[in-house]
């Protein structure tokens, strides 16, 4: 029947069958779930990373979108690790010529006793207006979170997700006040040194 429809040409029949097999194979592959990259350990993040990003603020009218320069260093520290990051922000002053402000943070982490979770070495009391920070790895993402309780009883929380990708590291940052998102930043970094 198919041979009759195709005019009895065996090459046409072969071409139609080959196309059908390719379509079936492509369809079957598309339906298979993509495998997530294997989880990594903290050593995969070691090194010096540099890049840039864009910050978006929900609380500023003159500086809703601003550029940032990003530097991150992760290195071993005894049984744990130390992470340092510097951000050059441009979110104050004259909107046409913003003032560059450099902010630097360094946190040392040690194992918490729970697999894949680290606690800040000098864990502080958030009720004393100090930061309380912890870190965890999920898949290819190192997440550092910090919590501080303000004098008015409200809280501020910052979440840094640093995800390893074939081309480097992706940063997703979110700052919350009392559960409401007030600022986000997205960036890309490349490894410049071990």
Image (tube, grey):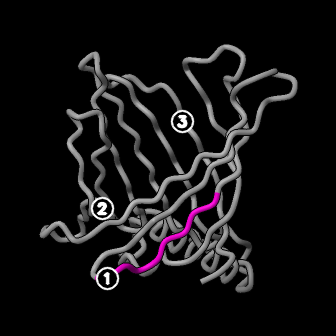
The residue furthest right is 96
Q: Which residues are magenta?
A: 71-78
Q: Give the side of residue 57 with respect to residue 34, left or right.
A: right
Compare marks 1 and 2 and give the one earlier in the sequence: 1
User: Which residue carries the number 3 mark?
Assistant: 184
Q: Secondary structure at mark 2?
A: strand
The answer to whether residue 65 is above or below residue 108 is: above
Query: What residue appears at the point 43 percent right and 26 percent down from the top-left corner?
Result: 181
- Mark 1–mark 2 distance (CA, rounded to whole Å): 17 Å
CA separation in Å, label 2 and label 3: 20 Å
- Residue contact between numbered discs 1 and 2, judged by CB atoms under 8 Å: no
Counting from the top left corner in percent of width and height, residue 160 is at 45, 50
Residue beneath label 1, please?
78
Residue 4 drawn in magenta: no
Horizontal arrangement in the rendering, residue 82 relative to residue 80 (left or right): right
Within 10 angstroms of label 2, few (less than 14), some, or many (20 or more) residues?
many
The mark closer to the camera, 1 or 3, is 1
Residue at the location (77% across, 32% down)? Answer: 99
**In the image: residue 173, left or right of residue 97:** left
Quarter of the figure with residue 7: bottom right
Crowd tier of the residue under label 1, counting other residues whose Cα lies within 10 Å: few below 14, some 14–19, many 20 or above: few
Q: Nearer the viewer, residue 159 or 107?
A: 107
Q: Residue 17: which disc?
A: none
The C terminus lies in which quarter of the figure?
bottom right
Residue 136's tag is: 2
Quadrant location of residue 122? bottom left
Earlier residue among tags 2 and 3? 2
Q: CA distance from mark 1 to mark 3?
A: 32 Å
Q: How many marks?
A: 3
Image spot of residue 52 (x, y percent): 71, 52
Q: Earlier in the sequence, mark 1 or mark 3?
A: 1
């Amino acid at each position: 029947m198919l041979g009759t429809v195709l005019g009895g040409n065996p090459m046409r029949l072969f071409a139609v069958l080959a196309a059908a097999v390719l379509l079936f194979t492509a369809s079957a592959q598309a339906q298979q779930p993509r495998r997530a990259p294997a989880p990594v350990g903290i050593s995969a993040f070691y090194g010096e990373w540099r890049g840039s990003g864009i910050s978006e603020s929900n609380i500023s009218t003159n500086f809703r979108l601003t550029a940032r320069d990003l530097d991150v260093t992760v290195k071993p520290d005894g049984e744990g690790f130390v992470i340092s990051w510097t951000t050059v922000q441009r979110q104050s002053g004259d909107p046409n010529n913003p003032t560059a402000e450099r902010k630097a943070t360094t946190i040392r982490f040690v194992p918490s006793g729970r697999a894949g979770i680290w606690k800040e070495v000098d864990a502080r009391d958030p009720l004393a207006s100090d930061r309380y920070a912890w870190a965890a790895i999920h898949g290819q993402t190192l997440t550092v979170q910090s919590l501080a309780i303000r004098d008015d009883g409200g809280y501020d929380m910052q979440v840094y997700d640093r995800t390893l990708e074939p081309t480097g590291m992706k940063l997703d940052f979110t700052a919350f006040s009392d559960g409401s998102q007030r600022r986000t930043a997205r960036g890309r970094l490349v490894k410049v040194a071990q």
